Structures are given as C-alpha cells and as structure tokens.
Image (cartoon, helix red, strand yellow):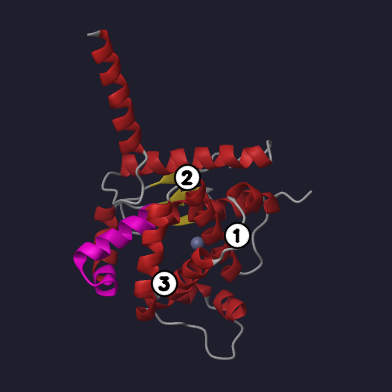
Amino acid sequence: MKKAIIFFFIYSLCVNAQSQNQYFQLYTDSAELKNGNDSMIREFEMMVKKTQPSFSFNGLSTESPNTFMPGQYRSKTNKIYQVTWPTAKPAMGPFLTSVMGSVEEGEKGAGLFFYGFFFPHEIGHALHYNTKMVPGNNYDAEYEANVIAVLYWRSKGRHKELDQCYAMAKKILPKFVNPVPENADAKQYITEHYNELSQNPLQYGYIQFSQIVTILEDKSLPDFDTYISKYFPK
Ligand SMILES: [Zn+2]
C-alpha cells in the first residue's frame, strides 16, 4: 500500500513536471504561458550565473496581453510579451496556413517556433540589454538571439525539436522573400529598414528563417556556457 502511494506520488510529480515544461506546443492559457516562460527566464538566469555570479535579469518577466502583438522583448519595461494562440490565430493563422501548406502544419509551425524556439530568443535580447552588450546592428542582434536559442535548446537536449525546426525552416524558406537588394550590405540594409521589414512577414520571415538554417548548419558553435561568456568580457 505504502509503495503504491509513493509510486503514485512520484508518477504524478513526473506528469506534472512534464505538463509544465513541454514548450514547442500551442499555448491557449495565458497563465500557463506566463508560468512556462517565467520559469525559463529563471532557469536561464541560473545558467548565466554559472559564468557571472553577479548577473541578474533585474526582474525580467512575461506578460501575455489580450490583444495581438508579435512575441517580443521590450527594454523599456524589461518584459517579454507573448500572446496565446487564440489571441494570435486571427492575425497569424491564415499567413501560417499559406506558408506551411495546411492549417495543421501552420499550427505545428506556430508551436515549434513561437512557443518553443523563440522563447529563449527573446530572453537572448533581454540578455543583451541587461549586460549592456546590445549588438551594433539589428541583423547581428537577431543572429545572436537565434544562436542563443539554438544553444539553449541543445543544452536542454531538445535535439528532436531543433531537427523539426530545421526541417520546417528549410521547407518554407523558398516561400519567403529576401528583402536585401543585390549589392547592398545586408547588415546595414536590414538595420536601416528594420521597422518596415518587421511589418512584412514574408521579408521578416526570410531574415529569421535563413539565419536559423545557417546557425543550425554551423558546426563550429560552442556550447551555451562558452558562448554566453562573451557577454562578460574580462
Ligand atoms: Zn528577435
């Protein structure tokens, strides 16, 4: 009897832990979304503290507004904004369906990228601001945030999900449009046109997904702890 109770207790703990920290899935509940992202922020902070014990995100937390906005970090409030799928769907669903090929694939893509890959990406932007090491141009800022996302998920052993992100990014990339004119300097062009590009999902998506493919193919990347140390120059 005792054994059965202990077994049940351990089993329910496992189920609980799993359901709390799934990620890479659609979030329909704003409290669950906030809890998931906030626990990632705290864990991320602990990982950075291994390199720099005095580091703090200075109270960084997640807010889940009821009106649509793309997932983003804002330095003014030191908050990460993420909306649930029911809030995002009217604005993003039709676009994702057309790019990914079906409603089902569109929702799979939303789960993989918006509620998985891009969580630590936004924390990466917060790391830039909270270490006062913001990259000098928007191209590099996005690239470094994407590297941080890849290395974070690798450190968590989420290789299967990263493989799925890679396969999907490769598949959909031809549907996006490279906004950089021939002969233009990509970093300069993207930095100067960043606001208008971020309003155009076909162009903005090209920048993000082409970076993600390049990073996932890059065999020279170090592990998370080594990479993070560059934000704490001695
Ligand atoms: Zn970003």
Could you tell me the amino acid type at mark 1? Leu
| Residue 55 visible in the shown view | no
Q: Exactly how many numbered labels are in the figure? A: 3
**3D distance between C-alphas at marks 1 and 2:** 16 Å
Mark 3 or 1, which is nearer the eye?
1
- From mark 2 to mark 3, how far is it between C-alphas? 25 Å
**What's the magenta region?**
95-115
Q: Is mark 2 within 8 Å of ligand 1?
A: no
Location of mark 1 (residue): 221
On screen, 171 above or below 114? below
Quadrant showing the N terminus:
top left
- Between marks 3 and 1, how big is the CA–CA gap? 23 Å
Residue 109 at x, y percent in the picture: 31, 62
Residue found farthest to the left: 103
Expressed as whole percent of the image width and height from the top left, the position of residue 36 reads: 39, 41
Q: Foreground: 49 or 58?
A: 49
Kind of residue indicated by mark 2: Lys
Residue matched to label 3: 205
User: Of the residues under marks 3 and 1, which one precedes in the sequence?
Assistant: 3
In the figure, residue 117 lies in which quadrant?
bottom left
Element at label 2: loop
Magenta-drawn stretch, dominant element (helix, strand or loop): helix
Residue 156 circle label: 2
